Amino acid sequence: MIDPHEPWAAMVQHALHILPVALALVLPVVAVGALLLRRTRALGTTMTLLVLIPLVALLAGVLGISGFMFTSTLATMVLVCLLVALVVVPVALVIGRLTARRTVWEREARERERAAEASRRELVAWISHDLRSPLAGIRAMAEALADGVVAEPDEVAGYAARIGSETSRLSGMVDDLFELSRITAGALSLTMAAVPLREVVGDALAAQAPVALRKGVRVLADAQAWPTVLGSDTELGRVVRNLLANAIRHTPPDGTVTVRVDRDGTDAVLAVDDACGGIPDAELARVFDVAFRGAAARTPESGDQPAGAGLGLAIAKGLVEAHHGRIDAHNHGPGCRFEVRLPLAAG
């Protein structure tokens, strides 16, 4: 021990004597700690090491300058360091875990935001293209009628019919965009009641029959049971129509689209099978994404049924989830199956 009455010069000389010994013991501890920190990936372990390394280095330095003489002062110092470690290490672990969770949550939030932004850009690109095409056709046909290029009654009637068809297509796109905006904004308000699936499926089949007839696609209904579900008949009808329209669009002529209805426990099951040739596994997880249309290798759309805006399946998913149901897609037979599960109505 240093005498407090010892001259300052002697105290400095003594400090210079013990300093190399302390450094010789502290530096290896710090080097090993830095190596462990470099190899550690877990944030909780990193926080614990950041607490333990200074404490262990301090103990090593104290042992060095004491000459490994276990006096009462050294025992007190060791005891204090252990108490500090017992208090600080659990706190460091908790802080590390909380920080790790927050970091993961922030990273996932950023990824979701980037995915949503990419989806919005893709949607704007698709919608801009899809709106531009029918508008250009309508404008060209209107100019031909206005300039008298088309004057024969039959030709005028044909142009008028085509303008009406393109206008209906534009109206459908606008309706889809409005419906999708209501779903994504959480502004969808459903009037729930007992809805017989027989009526919903029948109306959807009747609405899609002309499209299927023009393309030469057979549409069949196969019901093991006709359950009644709790929901909104308008929105459920839209779900079935969207699924049927998607199935007919991707089924080649002379193919078959089948609507299957059954009951499974407390759920009603509605499945739409098509003959699209299947969907690549890498794309199955994206079929319900906004503006997703799939690979170009799938059966191309005919001129009588141009490609949609890629909103139908996204709307169907949003409406099914608003009914507390589930919808999924998987390859089945010559094509794929879109399966909807809805809760049965009470009683």
Image: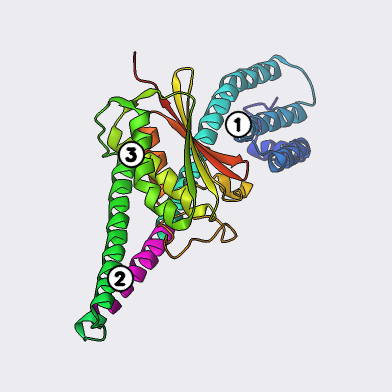
Rendering quarter of residue 65: top right
Q: Secondary structure at mark 3?
A: helix
Residue at (25, 35) in percent of width and height = 189
Q: Residues within 10 Å of mark 2 (few under 14, many from 20)?
A: some
Q: CA distance from mark 1 to mark 2?
A: 59 Å
The structure's colour scheme is rainbow
- Magenta extent: 122-143
The answer to which of 139 and 244 lies nearer the viewer is: 244
Question: x, y percentage for residue 273?
Answer: 53, 41
Residue 44 tag number: 1
Residue type pointed to by label 3: Asp
Please, is residue 269 above or below residue 182 in the view? above
Residue 16 seen in render: no
Residue wearing tag 3: 203
Q: Earlier in the sequence, mark 3 or mark 2?
A: 2
Mark closer to the observer (3, 1): 3
Residue 230 magenta-drawn?
Answer: no
Report the amino acid beneath label 2. Answer: Leu
**Mark 3–mark 2 CB contact (< 8 Å):** no
Tag on residue 135? 2
Q: On the picture, is 118 further left or further right than 47? A: left
Q: Main secondary structure of the magenta part?
A: helix
- Where residue 239 appears, x then y in whole percent? 38, 40
Front residue of 80 and 229 = 229
Q: Return the residue found at the far left.
A: 146
Helix, strand, or loop for circle 1? helix
